[in-house]
Image (cartoon, helix red, strand yellow):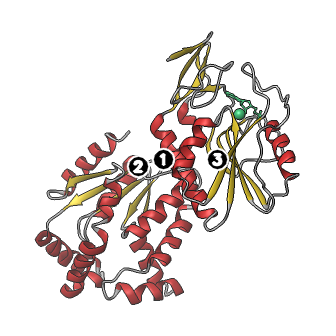
Amino acid sequence: MIQVLDKTFETFITREELAKEVKSLATQLNEDYKNEEVVFIAVLNGSFMFASDLMKEVDLVSEITFIKMSSYHGTESTGRVDELIGLNNDLSGKHVVIVEDIIDSGLTMNKIISLLEMEDPKSVKICSLLYKPEAFRGDHKPDYIGFSIPNAFVVGYGLDYDEKGRNLDEIYQIREEGGIAFDKAELENKDKMLNVVLFGPPGAGKGTQSQRLVEKYGLIHLSTGDIFRKNIKGETELGILAKSYMDKGQLVPDRVTINLLKSEVLKYENPKGFIFDGFPRTNKQAEALDEFLEGINSSITQMISLDVEEGELKSRLANRAKESGRVDDANPEVIQKRINVYRAETAPVKEFYASQNKWMKIDGLGSIEDITERLFKAIDSLK
Ligand code: IMP
Ligand code: MG
């Protein structure tokens, strides 16, 4: 907790969260404006820290300039706006990105945009670190948003309370009588979903264990392999395509698998979370999954690897072939091929999650029950 003048504030968005989001905004800008000329216009005073951090991550041929509107006093937006000062750049025919710390009522932005449009830019977009959708009554919603936040007063990272607190390196939320106005977990459902990637070579027990996790945690089990097999059985177009690869122990192409997975995830309304089984299998799939989940305000919680040595895998697969009749389990050559593909293409996915600190390993030997217990313990430790 901190004190700014007469008010108490609590940490709301940490330095790490800010850094991560600023980077992701810059990545989007870098993609969207590749090979274009951009003029960034940061609105002082509030956006000075955000603009500075953002620009360090932007790698476009660009200009940055700072403009100033009337400042804001007190804890409520007045809607009063003065003149725009400080714009000396020629904007005609150029893309403009306005960099703001916060968009509250959006009335400041109305005025800024109407003034900038007189300069005849090629386009005008808004990149705002914070956005308060409940307070917004303007004409221009931000195109790039760092965080959508509840309608409560915040300070720090450039934002002020009566001109104080701009230097704080995190964002703090005002503490009203009786506690903070909003629980951070309510902000996004990001923290609500439990998304586990269950990982391991063919025969590690992913499918069996997934069923148990579904029962215990109410998660949805998504096995791209099962979906492909269902399609193969139904002789759908997707099935015929998938079969041509799976019969040889090869991976179905990323593009096909990724699109399939997205459409499966989007079938569920308010899911508690997913167990991804057999996906992602390549780094490209992992990147696509991250990007997709971010777009629906979620993320992978953890990748859990089931660790089983190769001899054991082969004998498990041979047994499964007898019981389940899966053709890809029956042929030792295909089995070996699948294990090799796993080593070459799938195992590196582990590094992808490890580098995000989202990887752990579970001993996959022992009775099914023992392994389940280990998994429960691992998952409970994530919450
Ligand atoms: P507008 O309501 O979108 O026009 O925003 C006007 C200005 O109010 C912003 O540029 C900020 O300077 C200020 N402001 C709005 N909400 C907050 C807040 O929660 N903390 C600090 N300043 C704010
Ligand atoms: Mg401002």
Front disc: 1 or 2: 2
The residue closer to the viewer here, 307 or 331, is 307
Dots 1, 2 in contact, CB < 8 A = yes
Instruction: Examine the rendering and report whether any part of residue 253 can be seen.
Output: yes
Q: Badge 2: how crowded within 10 Å, few (<14), some, or many (20+)? A: many
- Measured in 3D between alpha carbons, the distance from the residue under mark 1 to the one under mark 2, in whole angstroms, is 8 Å
Which residue is depicted at the point 30% across and 59% down?
351
Q: Looking at numbered disc 1 in the image, what kind of residue is underneath it?
A: Met
Against 95, residue 167 (above or below) is above
Mark in the foreground, 3 or 2: 3
- Where is mark 3, residue-wise? 145
Q: Nearer the viewer, residue 6 or 369?
A: 6
Residue hosting label 1: 193
Circle 1 packing at 10 Å, graded few (<14), some (14-19), many (20+), is some
Instruction: Tell me which numbered mark, 3 or 2, is placed earlier along the sequence.
Output: 3
Residue pictured at 73% horizontal, 18% vertical: 74
**Tag 2: amino acid:** Thr
Determine which of the numbered discs, if any, sits on residue 301 in the image: 2
Residue 238, percent from left and from top: 51, 83
Q: In this orientation, which residue lies closer to the viewer: 148 or 248?
A: 148
Mark 3 near ligand 1 (CB under 8 Å)?
Answer: no
Going from the N terminus, do you reach mark 1 or mark 3 first?
3
Locate residue 71, reporting x and y percent: 76, 27
Q: Is mark 2 within 8 Å of ligand 1?
A: no
